[in-house]
Image (cartoon, rainbow, N blue to C red):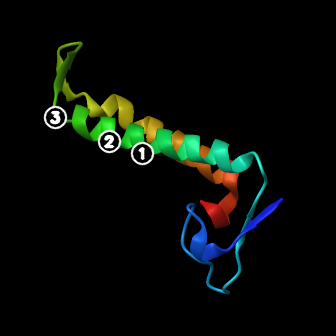
Amino acid sequence: MIHHPGWLSVFGPALPNGGGVTIREGEKEIGMVIVSLYIAAQIISDVASLKIALIAGFSIDAGTFIYPLTFTIRDLVHKRLGKEAA
């Protein structure tokens, strides 16, 4: 187990009580990948929202199909890293 001071943590701000966030050795790398996926999905969704897709006769912005994935990825961040780190 590695103890990262809250103010040095790349996973969030310092905790109110001044404590730190404890992240297991392999969790840091996995967390960085999941957070990167979340940011990428959010950006792609925003850019895709500028395009209009025609599906079954309905005009829908393309970001509508990507944006729901961000909720799932954000939940993965919370489950893997815990509430304090997320």
Quick check: 63 left or right of 40?
A: left
Judging depth in this view, the residue of 54 and 40 nearest the camera is 40
Say whether disc 3 or disc 1 marks the residue closer to the N-terminus. 1
Residue drawn at (59%, 59%) of the image: 86
Residue closest to the far right: 1
Q: Which residue is mark 1?
A: 39
| Picture layout, residue 48 above or below residue 84 | above
Q: Which residue is mark 3?
A: 50
Q: Callout 1, which amino acid?
A: Ile
Mark 3: secondary structure: loop
Image spot of residue 2 (x, y percent)? 78, 61
Q: Callout 2, which amino acid?
A: Ile
Q: Which residue is mark 2?
A: 43
| Picture layout, residue 7 above or below residue 33 | below
Image spot of residue 33 (x, y percent)? 57, 40
Tell me how far mark 2 sits from mark 3, CA to CA: 12 Å
Q: Callout 3, which amino acid?
A: Leu
Tell me how far mark 3 sits from mark 1, CA to CA: 18 Å
Mark 2: secondary structure: helix
Tell me how far mark 1 sits from mark 2, CA to CA: 6 Å
Please tell me how crowded label 1 is: few (under 14), some (14-19), or many (20+) other residues with Cα within 10 Å: some
Q: Nearer the viewer, mark 2 or mark 3?
A: 2
Residue contact at pointers 1 and 2, CB within 8 angstroms: yes
Residue drawn at (65%, 42%) of the image: 30
Quick check: 9 left or right of 67?
A: right
